Image (tube, coloured by chain):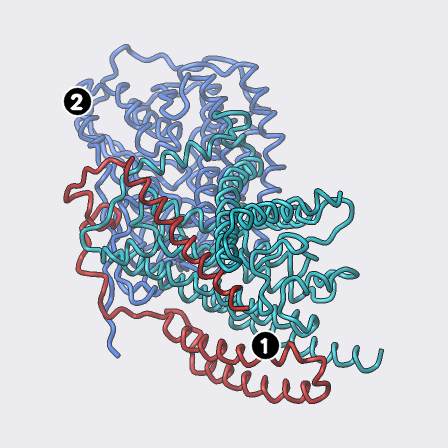
Amino acid sequence: MLSNYAIIAILTIGGLIFAAAAMLISRIFQPRKQYSKKTDTYECGFETKGSSWMSFRSSYFVYALVYLIFEVEVIFLYPWAVEFKMLGLFAIVEMIIFFTLLIAAFLFAWKEGAFKWY
Amino acid sequence: MRTQTYKINLGPQHPSTHGVLHVVLEIDGETIVGSETNIGYLHRGIEKLAENKKYPQVIPYTDRLDYLAGMSNNLLYVQTVEKMLGTEVPERASYIRVIIAELMRIANHMVGIGIYIMDLGAVTGVFYPFIQREHILDLFSKLCGSRMTFNYMRIGGVAVDIDEDFIRGTEIFLDQLPKMLHEYHTLVDENEIFLSRTKNIGKISKSQAESFGLTGPNLRASGLGYDLRKVAPYEVYDRFDFNIPVAYNGDCFDRYIVRMQEVEESIKIIRQAMAQLPQGEIKAKLPRIIKPEAGDCYHQAENPKGILGCYLVSDGTPKPYRVHFRRPSFNNISIFDEVAIGHKIADFIAIMASFDFVLGEVDA
Amino acid sequence: MEFLDNIFLYGTSIIRSIITWIGFDPAITNMIMAAVYTVAILVICTLVALFYVLYERKLAGFIQYRPGPNKLGPFGLFQTVADAVKLLTKEDIVPRNADKALHFLAPLFVFIPPILALGAIPFGNKLVAVDLNIGMLYILAVTSLSTIPFFLAGWSSNNKYTMLGAMRAVSQKISYEIPVIFSVLAITMIAGSLNMSEVVGMQGKLWFVFVQPLSFLIFFIAGIAETNRAPFDLPEGESELTAGYLTEYSGMKWALFFLAEYCSMFVFSAMATTLFLGGWLGPVLPGWMWFVLKVHVLMTVIIWIRWTFPRIRVDKLLEFNWKILIPASILNIFATGIGVYLFNNFF
C-alpha cells in the first residue's frame, strides 16, 4: 500500500523534472536581450498605473469560502457513498438529513448574495 | 472593507479594440465604474492631405477612411464634387454605383458581424461571413484591380463599366448568400450563450442615440428608422422597393440583427438594380481640369457604418480649399463612455464589437 | 489478440525481469519501475499534447472551411514539432515588477496535477501505474490542485489583466469542482467502490452513462469548465483580458501552460471514459485501443464545442454553476440514492 504512494511521490518529482528540464533546455537555446522596455508590465502598450497588488475587490473570495464548506462535506460523503448499498434505509435517511442541512446552508449563502460576481 | 479600483488600459494593443482605440477603464471588481475613450492613434491627416491634391486625386484618400467600405467613401466624395459642379451622372453609372455600394454594404456588414461574434469568443463565426466577403472582393478586384483601396468611382461616373462576368458573378453570389445567412442565423441567433451575452447589454435609448449623433445600423437598432436612402434618396435609390430594418431595444443583439436584415435588403436592391440596369454612358462629360466655383457644399450619404458626410470648400482653384468628413464611426463611439458604466468588462467588449467601428474612420 | 491486449504489460514485465536479473532487491526494483511508469506517463503527456494541438488546429480548419496547417510535412504533421522548436528558442521575458520566484514556480507546478491524475487512470486491464483503492477521490484531489499554478501565474505577474484572469480562474475552477465531485459521488453510490479499475469492471453489461445520463452531462460540462476550454475559457479570455493569467508568460513557460491544458483535457476525457463510458471495455480491439478511441471521441467533442460556441460571461458562468449545475447534481444524488435503495431491496 505504502509503495503505491511512493510511486505517486516519484510521479510528482517526474512532473517537476519534466517542466524544469523543458525550461532548462529552453534556457540554453534562447536569446537573452533584456532591456527595460521589454520587461515592462504589459498593459496594451501603456505604462501601468500603480501596482496590481492592492486591496482590490476580489470576488472569488466568497466562492472560495462556500467551496470549502462543500469540499469538507464531500470528504464525509465519500465513505457514505461507498457503503451506501450496505447501509440500506439508514443511508437514505442520513442522506436526507445531511443534504437538507447542506441545501439550507447553500440557500442561505445564495440569499446573502454570495453567488454574485462583481 | 473598502476596496480600491483598478485603472486599466484597454488598447491600443488589445485584440478587440479593432485597431488602436485606447480606453481607460476604471473597474471595481469586474464592473466598470468609469471609462475614458482616447482616439488619435491612427490619425493620418487625410483632410489636410486632401488640400494639396487636385479634386480627382482625393478619391484614393477616401478609400483609407473606412477601409472596409472603400467604395462607399469613394461614392460620397465624388457625389459631393458633382453636387458642387452641378453634374448630371449618366443613368447607367448611377445604377452601377448603387450595385457597387450595396455590395460594399454587404461586405462591410459581413466583417462587422464576423468580428462581433469573434470578439464574443466564437472564432469560427468570423470565417463564414468572411467567405462571403471574399466573393465580393473577388468581384471588385476583377472590376478595378484592387481588394480594399478601390479608387473606382470617378467624378461624373465610374472608372470602368461592369461586364457580363461581373453581373453573372454577382448573381451567383446573391443566390448563395441567403443560404449562408440562414446558416448563420441558426448558428448564432439561437445560441443561448450569444443571447445572454447580447440581450439587454449596452442598451441605448432612442433619445440617447439621437443626442450622441449615432447613425446607421446603430441608430436604427434604437428604434429610429432614419436612413438617407429613404429619407433623402440619392443616386437612384428612390426607384427600388426595399425596407429599412428597425429594432427597438437598442441592445447589442438588436444592432446585430439590424445588420443581418440590412444585408437581406441590400440583396433586394442589387437584384432590382441589375434587372433595371440601362445601357448607355458610364461617365459624364467634364472638363479635364475640375475647378468648381468658389463656394462650399455639404453632402451626406448612408454608408454601411452610418451617415458619412463631406464638406467641401472651394476657392476656385483645382485644389479644394478645405475638405472635411463627418465620419460615422467617430460619432458612434462617442457614446462608449456613457454606455460602459455599470457593465462588466466582457460586456464592454460586446458593446464595442456591436458598434462595428473602424479606427481608420474615427481618426481619419 | 491476447498478445496485443497485454503488449504494454509484457513490456513492463520484461523491464522488471531485466532489473531483477541485474540484481537489485525488490524495493529498489519497485522504485525503478515507478520511474519507468513516470517516464511512460510523461511520454503519453507529450504525445497527447503534440497530437491534439495539431488535431485541434486541423479540426478547427475543417470547421472553418480552411485547410489548417498544411505546409510542414504531409498534412502539416510537423507543424507542432516546428512550433515546439520555436517556443524552445523564444526568449523568456520576466516582467520587472513581477514576483520572480512565483513567476518561475507557476509553470514548474503546472504539469504535476495532470501527471498525478494520469498515474491512477487505467488505460487498459491492469494497465495502470498505481491502482489505488481510493482512485477516484485521489484523482479529484490532485486535479483540484491545478488551481494553484494558475493563481500563482496570475498573481505573480503583477499585471492587472493577469490578476483578473487569476481571480476568474480560481472562482471558476473551484466552483466547477463541486458538480464534478457530486457527479462522481453518484457513480460511487452505484459502484460501491472508489477504485477506478473496479468501476470499469462493473460496466461490462451496461455503461454508467446509460444509468446516470444527467450525471454524465454535469460531469462533462463541469469538466470543460475545469480545463478552461471554450465556452468556459474565461481565465484566458483573449478578447477580453488579452491572455488572462498567461499575459506575462512567453517562450517555454507559456508552452508548459499550453501543453498542460491539453494534458488536463486528456485527463478529464480519460476520467469520463473510465467512469461513464466503460473504460477499456469493448469487443474485438485490444482494451487500451478502445480506451484511446473513447477518449479521442470525447476530445473531438470538446474541440468541436470550442469552435462552435461564443464565450460565456463570467457572472453567468458562475450563476450557471451555482444555480443550475449544483442543485441539479444534488437532486441527482437524491434520485440515485432512492433508485439504488429501491433496486437493491425490491428487485
The tally of labels here is 2
Quadrant location, the N terminus of chain B? bottom left
For residue B158, say whether it is visible. Answer: yes
Question: For this rendering, which residue is in front, B102 or A68?
Answer: A68
Would you name the residue on which mark 2 appears?
B52
> Residue B229 falls in which quadrant of the image?
top left
Shown colour of chain B: blue
Kindly identify the residue that appears in the image at 70 percent across and 61 percent down. Answer: C209
Of residues B199 and B303, the one drawn nearer to the viewer in this rendering: B199
Q: Quadrant of residue C148?
A: bottom left
The percent coordinates of residue B267 (x first, y second) are: 56, 34
Colour chain A appears in: red
Q: Residue furthest top?
A: B288
Q: List the residue tagged with mark 1.
A: A78
Does dot 2 land on a helix, a strand or a loop?
A: loop
The amino acid type, in three-letter code, at marker 2 is Asn
Q: From the top left corner, tell me how far across and down residue B160 is, in percent.
A: 43, 14
Q: In the picture shown, does residue B98 fall above or below A76?
A: above
